[in-house]
Image (cartoon, rainbow, N blue to C red):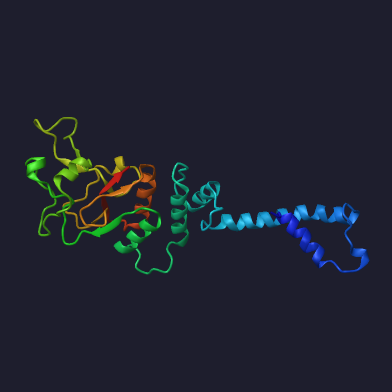
Amino acid sequence: MPTIADKIKRLTKRLLPTGRAWKLPPNGIFDRLVDALKVSEAQAVTDSLSLLDAILPDNDNFTADDATQWERRLGLIVNTSIPLADRKAAIRRKMNHPGTIPARQHYLDIEGQLQAAGFNVWVHENIPTTDPINFAASALGDINTYGSGSYGELEYGGASDIIANTILTPVEYGAFQYGQAQYGFAFNNKVANDIDPAVDLYFDTGLNFRSSFFIGGQTYGTFADVAASRQSEFRQLILQLKPANTVAFIYINYI
């Protein structure tokens, strides 16, 4: 298969005048001159193609090194353990954001941006409910719900799902347990202000959950899967997309 340099030499010979002075005898001085020039011209063509491949993550020649450079430029988390296809999707989303969509911070826009970044999740509004969990007495014991009010409780997942996916973290009252039991529970899968979930663990959502929304599976009340290696990236993107006064309760299995 002819190389780029071979194609350039053939093209050069076709563009030369037809007089005897422009003949290219094999291994002649003129022929060796054309061979020397075709090397630099082929390099210029290769560099140009490589530059185009590296500009946008829309081709198979976009490499992991290209992804790293763009992640640094765009302020994304650099994680080389993530599959290149997911990194390219996140870069494309960031390049296209905010685009021409006027209704930014709408829950469907947040959902679309998360999916565009390669996260197979859905966003659900907290209307008209206020509590992030319906505590089932049969599974969790007699625990008082917090934030109850005229908006009622949110029927979001069964108690078995809650326990199996470790959504509840026991909260101790100071350095001591309150009596023989721990003092309530904290929802450990929420995004409020920080990429680190430990920082947001004890974030006070206030007396109700009016400014909250939910990220999970397509069906309201189900869990979605996110690669554990992308947890920080996932939380960072939620923080960038959500209104600052809201808290995202995420029903996610990190796998």
Could you tell me if residue 106 is visible in this image?
A: no
Q: How many marks?
A: 0
Q: Position of residue 104 (x, y in %)?
A: 35, 64
> Which image quarter is the N terminus in?
bottom right
The answer, for residue 171, to whether it is visible in the render is yes
Position in image of residue 115 (x %, y %): 36, 57
19 left or right, relative to 219: right
The image quarter in which residue 117 lies: bottom left
Residue at (39, 58) in percent of width and height:
116
- Left or right of 69, for residue 125: left
Rendering coords of residue 246 (x, y %): 27, 55
Q: Residue at x 31, y 63 (%)?
A: 108
Residue 199's x, y, as percent? 30, 41
Tell me the quadrant of the picture where the C terminus can be found: top left
Q: Is residue 191 above or below residue 104?
A: above
Which one is in front, 68 or 50? 50
Q: Residue at x 81, y 67 (%)?
A: 15
Rendering quarter of residue 23: bottom right
Q: Nearer the viewer, residue 173 or 227?
A: 227
Q: In this picture, is 160 found above or below 175? A: below
Please give left or right for residue 235 compared with residue 20 in the image: left
Residue found farthest to the right: 21
